[in-house]
Amino acid sequence: MSSIDQLLARAQEISSDAEVVTQAPMRKVTLTARDGSPAGVMGLITLDNGQDHTRPNTFGPRSLIALNTAIDAALADDEITAIGVTGKPFILAAGADLTSIAGGGPDGVRVIGELGHAVFRKLQDGGKPSFGLINGLALGGGLEVALHCTYRTVMDSAPALGLPEVMLGLIPGWGGAYLVPNLVGPEKAVTLILENPLNNGKTLSGKAAYEFGLADACFSGADFLEQSLLWAADVLTGSVTVERPEIDRGDAWDAAVAKGAAVAKARTGGASPAAARAVELIAMAKTANRDEGFAAEDDALEDMSKTPELIASLYAFDLVQKRAKRPAGAPDKSLARPVTKVGIVGAGLMASQLALLFVRRLEVPVVLTDLDQERVDKGVGYVHAEIDKLLGKGRINQDGANRFKGLVTGSIDKSDVFADADFVIEAVFEEMSVKKQVFADVEKAVSPECVLATNTSSLSITEMAADLEHPERVVGFHFFNPVAVMPLLEIVKGEQTDDAALATAFATGKALKKTTILVKDSPSFIVNRLLGRFMGEVGKIVDEGTPVPVADGAFAGVVPMPPFMLMSLVGPAIALHNNESLHRAFPDRFYVSPALGRVVAAGKSSYYGPDGGIDPEVAELQEKPENPVVLDAAEVRERTLAGLAEEARLMLDEGVVGAPEDLDLAMITGAGFSFWNGGLTMLLDREGFGEKVSGKKFH
């Protein structure tokens, strides 16, 4: 391990002017306990990169240097008796600046890993009590800097706390892998370090993080800093005593590690070196001292920096953080029309989910319509009930709940309620004739400038708009289920869709906080086409004789869940409909399984029974070939990935999207494909399928 002076010098050498530096200004705050007792002076450091809340604080080389300078100043000032670390409004920090750190190569990663440890641990070892005041988002190194503090408070409404590194092909490298199990125990550490990141990057709210044991006190946002400083003063004067549970270092620790290993294997199939290494670090934390634990993190971080999974993760991270915010091919945003009222045709579950999203994000009137008043009332009732749930969870206040409820109404008369709508979206049955009739009816009720959007998952936008007086205002606006959770929104341009309608769709998608991707009007668009090819290939393999469990076991580490479990989630009927649509368009490549047809006809909603095994009735409905071809898991995987490589190349050649990056962004945000694989095409390149199938790589 290098000295901190050597690390600081090396960090300065590898730093870049491109880094958005998180400064660490410090001010002195005189502390007074609630009983009026003086409690000394806190050196309060506020992390701030000078950007608004859309650009979180991060730690690159220069940011760590700035924080080190601030901590040293606080430790050297005899008037200061305690140190506090907080962040700019609503954000503590989002962790490492991955782009600037990766630019230094494995040696640079090692330097930054050691420097982060050296700087952060001054909050533990400096001789003055320290307080991490988590006032908002705290991810990765942003949470770790607080974990190094003696005490922690958290804002109850903080949106996201977690250690997502494993999802990115890394490990918590600034103390998290050692400190968390020793703070909250190994079982919770497995949840925070492995399970949550591998569950699409799940995070904790501030209140949940407090209940989890990551913080010692929890306060509301309105006066969070004031309450935190009062609490800190009470701690320093002894009127508040912080107690933490004793950690069981016996068999329970080993059981938690075994669980972690099982989670890593089940979720990644051994394809993520970071997941395996994280398990090792949690195991080591049982007996290691802090120096040993931190050194092991440094070693692991350097090793991870040499893996292809990290390269893929950085690529995926860049897609989600940068490309997603500047959608390729989107028209000039100045062409977008304002949306002051939204109409929704349909009042079923999908339509009701859309209504909730629109009213929460746009805060404009939203009106649901359907064939009869009973359906309308049910849809509006669903939205109102969901708003009540948000109120109960503290996500909104009573005024907000009342306002949202007042904005969501329903009617059976489109002509009356859609006249002043700027944006109308249909969410009715997936049948072309039905959707065409809906738009024909809506067009009579709305202004010529009103955008007509369809949530179709597979049908032609061009055909849907063909008979309208103004086909240029029709656009595909395809959400993924559940609407509130899945980030992706495929925006589909029909042959006659004009730039004003398209720009309005992109602006609306951004306001809804969705990841928007421009898609050419083509069968099933991006995600459903690729998943359709995937499911078709697997279905054919099973129909030819490979058992379902073998096929389901072939894709750990490739897709977020096994194919037949995925089918159970989306519904066999929906999967069948998608593949039938694709088969009509591309009969030579998309297979429709007769067995799947029988499963749907039998009304089965899942291939699996309550015991986790294949439903015996479903097993009886499977094909029984005279000469079965039984593949092993590796052969299933190879054949299916080859099919995906072919389809991805064809989609690029057809211009469905403009670049492989858009395919990957869609599969990450719409289908949960992993960061460490880089979505889909990076994985196909890494395993040679791009060249094998089409003679060239995707990248």
Image (cartoon, rainbow, N blue to C red):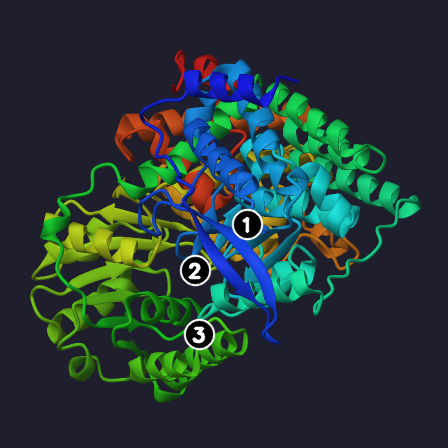
The amino acid beneath tag 3 is Ile
Residue extending furthest toward the front: 78
Image quarter (top left, top right, bottom left or bottom right) of the C terminus: top left
Residue 305 in the figure: left or right of residue 29? right
Q: Is residue 181 above or below residue 318?
A: below
Residue at which label 2 appears: 483
Q: Residue furthest bottom?
A: 373
Q: Nearer the viewer, mark 2 or mark 1?
A: 1
How many residues crowd mark 3 within 10 Å: few (<14), some (14–19), many (20+)?
some
C-alpha span from label 3 to label 1: 38 Å
Secondary structure type for disc 2: loop
Residue 18 visible, this angle: yes
Residue pictured at 48% horizontal, 78% vertical: 391
Report how far apart the C-alphas of labels 2 and 1 lie in the structure: 50 Å
- 451 relative to 477 in the view: left or right: left
**Percent of width and height locating residue 392:** 54, 78
Mark 2 or 1 closer to N-term?
Answer: 1
Q: Are marks 3 and 1 in contact (CB under 8 Å)?
A: no
Relative side of 19 to 204, left or right: left
* Neighbourhood count class around disc 2 (C-alpha, 10 Å): few under 14, some 14–19, many 20 upward: some
Q: Residue at x 67, y 52 (%)?
A: 607
Q: Nearer the viewer, residue 334 or 87?
A: 87
Q: In which quarter of the view is residue 48 placed?
A: top left
- Which numbered tag is attached to residue 80? 1
Vertical position of residue 27 compared to residue 109: above or below: below
The residue located at (36%, 22%) in the rendering is: 16
Q: Which mark is residue 396?
A: 3
Q: Are marks 2 and 1 in contact (CB under 8 Å)?
A: no
Camera-side residue of 138 and 468: 138
Say whether residue 603 is visible.
Answer: no
What residue is shown at x 60% (from left), y 36% (from top)? 166
Eye-nearest disc, 3 or 1:
1
